[in-house]
């Protein structure tokens, strides 16, 4: 199924908004993450942890999910397909890993949740003793920028699946 | 006479470059986690967060 131009533009607008918004949200998260890492002000660190928790659940997770879903819809409704071109397939799998594995389920948000809860209740000395979290947003930011560059350049290269589809499309009808 | 079966083209070089970059980055992050005791996740894994949240550090 191919989208009409107006639908394609609409889905593309959603995808771009979600994806670029995701990058912006990670930058905001990284700015807050600098506070506990660099400051000795416990109240600021406490506020930063609470802000990171809110940005994570209310901005980063929804935008990541919207980016993933709109990307899937966009690829399936256009000539690119989901697994036909390497740049689409790599972007797809990288987004899945970032969204589901790293952010939501395993590594990040459950831990941020607990740290933010701890920062709310703990004494000022304990807040200052909490670990910093600069590595995760910086790695995530690098990965997102890599996907962004890939999506802008759209380097050539068909997957085997895409190559077979192109062969079928080019074959003469008998 | 049968036509030769077409073979798919090899993977472009840039795909391998990206795969290597991802593997190196993942390994680096993994090593950093190991060396620093797991960073934030390690603190949680060691029970530090639970300890603080239950007041056990006082």
Image (cartoon, coloured by chain):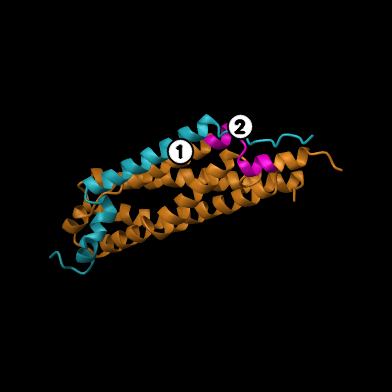
Secondary structure state at the residue bearing disc 2: loop
Q: Chain B is drawn in which colour?
A: cyan
On screen, A128 above or below A121? above
Callout 2: chain: A
- Whether the residues at callouts 2 and 1 have beta carbons within 8 Å, the answer is no
Label 2 in the same subunit as label 1: no
How far apart are the two marked residues, 2 and 1, measured between alpha carbons? 16 Å
Which residues are the magenta region?
A150-164
The residue under label 2 is A156
Q: Does the magenta stretch include residue A56?
A: no
Quarter of the C terminus of chain A within the rendering = top right
On screen, A167 above or below B49? above
Prevalent SS, magenta region:
helix
Secondary structure state at the residue bearing disc 1: helix
Q: In this orientation, which residue lies closer to the viewer: A165 or B45? A: A165
Left/right placement of residue B6 relative to residue A121 reads: right
Q: Colour of chain A?
A: orange
How far across and down, in percent of the image, does residue A118 sit?
Answer: 26, 62
The residue under label 1 is B19
Residue at x-position 49% and y-position 46%: A94
Residue at x-position 41% and y-position 36%: B21
Label 1 Cα neighbours within 10 Å, binned few <14 / some 14-19 / many ≥20: few
Residue at x-position 75% and y-position 43%: A5
How far across and down, in percent of the image, does residue A78 sit?
Answer: 70, 45
């Amino acid at each position: 199924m191919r989208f009409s131009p107006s639908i394609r533009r609409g889905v593309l607008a959603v995808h771009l908004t979600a994806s670029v918004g995701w990058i912006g949200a990670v930058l905001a998260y990284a700015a807050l993450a600098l506070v506990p890492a660099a400051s000795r002000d416990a109240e600021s660190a406490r506020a930063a942890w609470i802000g990171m928790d809110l940005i994570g659940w209310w901005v980063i997770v929804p935008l990541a999910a919207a980016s993933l879903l709109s990307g899937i819809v966009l690829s399936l409704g256009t000539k690119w397909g989901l697994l036909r071109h390497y740049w689409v397939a790599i972007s797809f799998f990288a987004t899945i890993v970032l969204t589901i594995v790293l952010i939501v389920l395993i590594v990040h948000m459950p831990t941020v949740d607990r740290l933010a809860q701890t920062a709310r209740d703990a004494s000022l000395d304990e807040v200052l003793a909490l670990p910093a979290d600069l590595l995760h947003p910086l790695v995530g930011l690098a990965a997102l920028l890599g996907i962004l560059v890939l999506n802008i350049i759209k380097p050539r290269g068909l997957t085997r699946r895409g190559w077979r589809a192109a062969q079928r499309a080019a074959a003469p009808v008998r | 006479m049968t036509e030769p079966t077409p073979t798919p083209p090899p993977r472009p070089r840039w795909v391998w470059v990206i795969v290597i970059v991802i593997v190196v980055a993942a390994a680096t992050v993994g090593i950093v986690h190991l060396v620093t005791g797991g960073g934030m996740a390690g603190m949680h894994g060691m029970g530090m967060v639970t300890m603080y949240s239950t007041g056990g550090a006082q």
